[in-house]
Each structure stands twice: as structure tokens, then as C-alpha cells.
Image: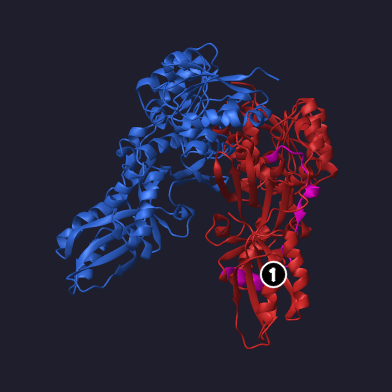
Chain colours: A blue, B red
Amino acid sequence: MTAPLRLGIAGLGTVGVGVVRLIQEEAALIAARAGRSIEITAVSARDRKKNRDVDLSGYAWEDDPVKLAQRPDVDVFVELMGGDSGPAKAATEAAIAAGKDVVTANKALLAHHGQALAEAAEAAGAVIRFEAAVAGGIPVIKALMEGLGANRIKRVMGVMNGTCNYILTRMESAGLPYETVFEEARSLGYLEADPSLDVDGIDAGHKLSLLASIAFGTRVSFDAVELEGIGRIDIADIRYAGDMGYRIKLLGVAQTTGRGLEQRMSPCLVPVESPLAQLNGGTNMVIIEGAASGQIVLRGAGAGEGPTASAVMGDVLDLARGVRYPVFGQPASTLAEPVAASVAAPAPFYIRMQVQDKPGALAKVATVMGDAGISIDRMRQHGNEAETAPVLIVTHRCTREALDYALSQLPQTGVLAGDPVAIRIEAL
Amino acid sequence: MTAPLRLGIAGLGTVGVGVVRLIQEEAALIAARAGRSIEITAVSARDRKKNRDVDLSGYAWEDDPVKLAQRPDVDVFVELMGGDSGPAKAATEAAIAAGKDVVTANKALLAHHGQALAEAAEAAGAVIRFEAAVAGGIPVIKALMEGLGANRIKRVMGVMNGTCNYILTRMESAGLPYETVFEEARSLGYLEADPSLDVDGIDAGHKLSLLASIAFGTRVSFDAVELEGIGRIDIADIRYAGDMGYRIKLLGVAQTTGRGLEQRMSPCLVPVESPLAQLNGGTNMVIIEGAASGQIVLRGAGAGEGPTASAVMGDVLDLARGVRYPVFGQPASTLAEPVAASVAAPAPFYIRMQVQDKPGALAKVATVMGDAGISIDRMRQHGNEAETAPVLIVTHRCTREALDYALSQLPQTGVLAGDPVAIRIEAL
């Protein structure tokens, strides 16, 4: 048997402790599959004294993760601290400079510095693996980079933030407004310290930018991700969308169109019978559409100790078996600078507006839509006793420009109360 | 760039032609990801003159696949002929004897001879890869063997025969009996030349035996798969199961219980809201339950030119990148001889019987169930004008022995018309 593979683990939060525990509990099984034993030689975290309910006595301790990364008895630096700068970045760079392989769960770091880190790693003959950075326990990076690696990818999309999915499904099931469920999620500890990472789609956007790079052979370009959070989703839209046969999900979509690479993380309507609509709570789903493979759907826990540790250790297993290839699936030097799509691909849209209940009002609305070149698939008016009534429209496929033009013209009809709301419908 | 990887392809049916086409169409993309070009040097098939609508002029032709496998200008033997013996077996053995790697879509060959072939390959320093043998385009072997490789697997299950799934979903949607839909499927060309491979669960059982070997570190043991086909599924059961909140699927389940390794391929009821129940037509789904990862669901096309070629080429890509590890994930010599579970794990069951519509009849049925130690979760009697009425029972979890005892006693109550029907309910 080959020599043991020696890990240095930086970060002993939920995921770090999960990795330690998995190695301790399944040592024999993992060694049988890896063809060699996997050992932890040293660990590092902010607070040495914290009780973590796991035995760390067999491992050297380093206060400084950079020192950990440089230890001669560490073959693989496992970075589980998080953060797009600071110690995580410094220690990852130190590991690479020392020619060590890196396994990381850090989506923010890679979304912001992926290209530079990949170039440095490849120059140093090191490998960076990051399965745990996207969709928790689902082996989606592996599916995209390896199993489906012979496919021209047409679209990759996914629900990749469990907190947002929890909030949206809870709003629907309990009929509660966003603000109430947001506070619930906060008190349950579901939200990041900075909740905007979750609810503004930033965390999920980081993940999408990594998938897009692999799928389309482009440099990671998080700044080009069009981000829209879930904070403006009205419980009314969740209800009306349901009536029309849709659910609202915070959905990431990456695809190449004639106009470049489109990367969007935004609330979308998906058909209620689609796999995406079935997702409840913290479950994640990624859908990969390959030219040859067709649509491949992957579903599983998007976070948590066990699932994330499973993903980290899948990468470690590969390294133990000697699997080595470039960080984003092809040499970093060959990744193209993405041309951000100036305009998203045409799509159908859901539009809700409050219209005065008087003769001719609907005709005015329909005229504006027609003048904008938008054809209407379905229109529904909900009757009530008030002076205005909600009108719901599902359009046929149209461009965002046409939609924006219509949205700007609708208030000028003088028959609306308030502004119309529009949400993209993602075809599946 | 490294030297090209040279393939010899044996078998030019749908899948073989798909692989040729994929290599021709995506050569540049695949080379970028593989770090080297992938070339076809020679091909082989039964009939050289057949028009295959793909340009084969650049490749050497071999009538004999054994000769193809032995060619010095072939690095990887790609076996797409099928069959558990004959030329496929001879050529695969020849390739291994010549020290060449093998990529195959042949589930029957591996289900019957997997252990011997793995031992031969490992002795010769060769690798056998078989992603395309299970669940078409879904990278499920890779997920199980690599991405989830640090997990103790608790259960692996799946719907892995598209033809059976087509028949069952068509019976439900059209309300047609099995025989009618079977003939439809035959005339549409969905069935194998020997239809029993499909409808008796043999093909899906082959696939399950491969997954079980990887999941549990045991020798492939197809003979130990408990097989039950779909031929006895009555349209009435599809309807009544639907009324009770279930759908019927030909479901493979492999799990280790206290009593050994259980491998079953049989019609099961699954809750209508579960991902398995959503599967229509030829789509496949595999569910892997890891101790750390939790439940991972993979879904995609289970057959067809593009999806299967995608899986074959995923394996070729790995070989081009230098990925090498034992055939079933750990050395063949370390795979344990599985102890077949003498008895399946306890489960709830659906039971349908035709009961005489007279006082005391139901009480007699309930007494038999109680005497067998089976507790009833739900019972439903469908009223009608006839002398007998269907009675449906969903039991709580019970052993198969208890169930079989109850089934043997029920007719002795004298209140039944015909024999009762029982179908396992797989908990999800």
C-alpha cells in the first residue's frame, strides 16, 4: 500500500468537525477505497479551547492557518474557514506556493479569486478541488467536470441556497409574508451572520459562477452574475403563481446565447410539476443540460455537517487515488474571458398588476402589451369587491427589453394602482 | 500535450455510432478537457456494409472484435456489442490480456463475469470502466464510487429500465391492461429482442448487482438478486394504489441488513409525492443513501444514443486524464463474498383482495392479519353492486414471513374470491 495521505485541516466549524469525524469513523472503509490510509496530521482554528465534541488530541495544533498550510507533514491543505479574503486566502496561497494540493469548501474565495488561484496552482503543479463549495453533498462539480465532460453544455441551473428555499417554501405553506419568515429563519440560526449573503443571492451567485466557468470553459466571473434576491417576493405572488401552475424559486441559470454568457441568480417561476418545484426546505438541486446527455438532475442536501464533509472527503479520495487535472477542468490559461450577455435570453414572464375595475381597463392593458410586441399566453382577473382587482398575465416568450418597455408604459394607461410586478418563468 | 488516446470501438449499433459521432463533433472540446486528443483508430461490427449514417472511412476495420482488441494502435478497447458471453466476452478478455483498458456499456457481461474480469484486469494493470452500463447518461457509477466514496452506503435503489417504466406509466395514464401496452411497446421497438430481459427485470437486475457491488464492497452477485417482473401487475392495482397515494414502479433496492446483503428488483409502491413516483416514460432515477451525505437523487435519460455515448466518453475522458483505480472501487481481491440476505428487510405492504359483501367478512380478514402479527395502517373497501367488493389494506412494517403466512391463511376464511395480491411499499 502507498504511503498515507496527510491532511492539514484549517477551520473547525460544522464542516471541519464533520470531516474529522468522518475520517475517524470510516477510516477502514475510506482506506480500502483510496488504496491508502488518510490521516490528519494537524488542525487549525481560531479558538483552541472551544469544546467541539470531537477528539483532536492526536493532531498537531497550529494557531496560524498559513503555518498549517506550510507544514512539511501536510500533503493536502483542507480549507474550511470560509471568507473571500483574509486567512482563508493567505493560507490557500501559502499551500499552493508550497506545492501542496488544496481541498476547499470556500465558494466566495473561488468566485472572487478562482482564476488567479488556478493559475498559481497549475504553475506550482498543485491541484485545487472544491466539490463542497457547490450544493453541499451533491457531487455536481464531479458530474459536470468528469462524468458529463464530453458534453457541450447547453444550460446549467440550480437551486443552491437552502435558506432562501426554506423561506420561499415556508411562505407558501404557512401563508406568511417575507418579513415574518425572514425573522423566523434568523431565530432558527438558518441565516448567515450577514443575511444578505443568503437572501440577496450572493452565496448562490458564487456557486453559479463556479459552475458556469466549468460548463463553458470561461474564467470565473462572479461580477458578471446578474443578482436579484428574494426580499421583494410578495406572498400574493406566491399564491397567484400557484394558481397559474407555478412555484417561485431562487434559481441560478447559466447559459451561452448568441449574445454571450448569461449568468443569472434570481427568483423565477417554475412549473409546479417540474423537479425544481418539488424542492422543499434546505434541499438543493442542480440541472445540467448536455448536448449528448440531455437533462441530468441532481438533488440532495445543500449544507450540513455530514453532506459537506462527504463532498470534502470525495475530493480527498480522488487525490489519494492520484486523480489530477486542472482546477476548472482545463488549463487556466485556456479559459476564455467571458463575454457577458448584454441581454438575457428571451423567456415567458409572469406579470401581476392591480387594475381598476371599470370598462375598458383590461383592453388598455392588452393594448400596451401588444404595442410592446408581447403576446399573451394566459390572462386571469381575480374578481373582488374593491375598486381594483389583481390581473395576472403569463406572456409568451419575449425579450427583457420588450418587457421593460411594457412595464414602463403600463402605469401611463391610468388604469393601474401601483406598479406592476414581473417575474421570469424559466422553461424546463 | 500528451500523445493522443487511441480507441478501438467494437459494436456500431445505436451506442457505437453515438460515440463515433460525439468524438467527431466535439473533438476540440473533448481534447481541451482531456489535455490530449481522443482518436478512433479502428472499429468493428458484424456487418461492414450496413449504412450507419456516419463517416467511418478514417478508421481501420476489423471483422473480428478480438483482433480489434489486440491491435497495437489501440490503447482503449470500447466494447459496445453487448451480451454476457460470445464475442463481447472474448474480445474483452483479449483486450485485458493485452494490457489494454476497457470501457464498456455491457451490464450483462459484468453482472455475470465482473469478478473474474476485474481480477484479470487488475493482474494485467488494466482498468475497466462501465458508467454506460447503468442508467444511461446519468453519472451514477462515478457518484457512488468517487464523489460519495467516503460514505458508508445505507441503501441504493433505482428505476433503471425505461421500458418497464414506460409500460407502467402508460398503463396508468391510458388505463390500459399490461398485455395491450406490452404489445404497443413491442411495435414501437422499445423491447429487447428477448422481451423478458426487460419485463422480467433481468436487465435492471444486472444494473442493480453492479451498484450493489460498489456500494457494499462485495463481489458482483447477480444470481443473488431477487427478481420479479411487471407481467403480473394488474391495472386495478395501479388504480387502487393511486387512490391510496402510491404509484407502482419496477424498483431495484440493495441494502445490507443484519441478515446480509439484500438485492431486490421488483414492482414496489412508492409515495406519489416522492421523486421516484414523478418518473415518466424512459427516464431513470437512482437514489443513493450515504451515512454522511444523506439521500442523493440522480435523474436522467436511461438509454438512447446521446446519453449512453456521453457516459462512455466520460469514462474515456477519465482514462485520458490518467484516472486509474480498481474496477469496483477497491481491489477485486478485497471484495467480500456477499451473504445473501435470507429474508428481506421488513416493510409495509399493499394488499388487495376481493371479499364477499356479507356481514363478518371484513372481521375475518382483520383477524387473520392480527393473528399473523401484522398491524393495519389503512383499510379501504370499495363498494359496488356485485357480490364481492375489493378491499385494500396498507399494513404497517412487517416481515415477508408474516405476510406470506397471512396470505396463505386469508383464502381459508372462505370470504375471498380469488387470491389476494400483495405488493411491497418501499419507504423513502
The quarter holding residue B32 reads: top right
> In the image, B106: left or right of A52?
right
Left or right, A25 with respect to A400, comes to right
In the image, residue B320 lies at what x, y percent? 64, 28
State which quarter of the image contains the C terminus of chain B. Answer: bottom right
Image height check: is B1 above or below A233? above
Q: Is mark 1 on a helix, strand or loop?
A: helix
Given residues B290 and B342, the one toward you in this image is B342
Number of numbered markers = 1
Q: Is residue A265 left or right of residue B417?
A: left
Residue that numbered label 1 is attached to:
B369
Q: In which quarter of the image is residue B22?
A: top right
Q: Residue at x 25, y 52 (%)?
A: A404
Judge whether residue B229 is colored magenta.
yes
Tell me where the magenta segment starts and ends, as one range: B216-242
Nearer-the-camera pick, A292 or B25? A292
Chain letter of mark 1 equals: B
Find residue A230 and report its horizontal and vertical position in percent. Answer: 31, 48
B255 part of magenta stretch: no
- In the image, residue B117 sits, relative to residue A12, either above or below, namely below
How many residues crowd around disc 1 within 10 Å: few (fewer than 14), some, or many (20 or more)?
Answer: many
Q: Nearer the viewer, residue A321 or B258?
A: B258
Residue B327 in the image: state x and y as whole percent: 72, 33
Residue B99 visible in the picture: no
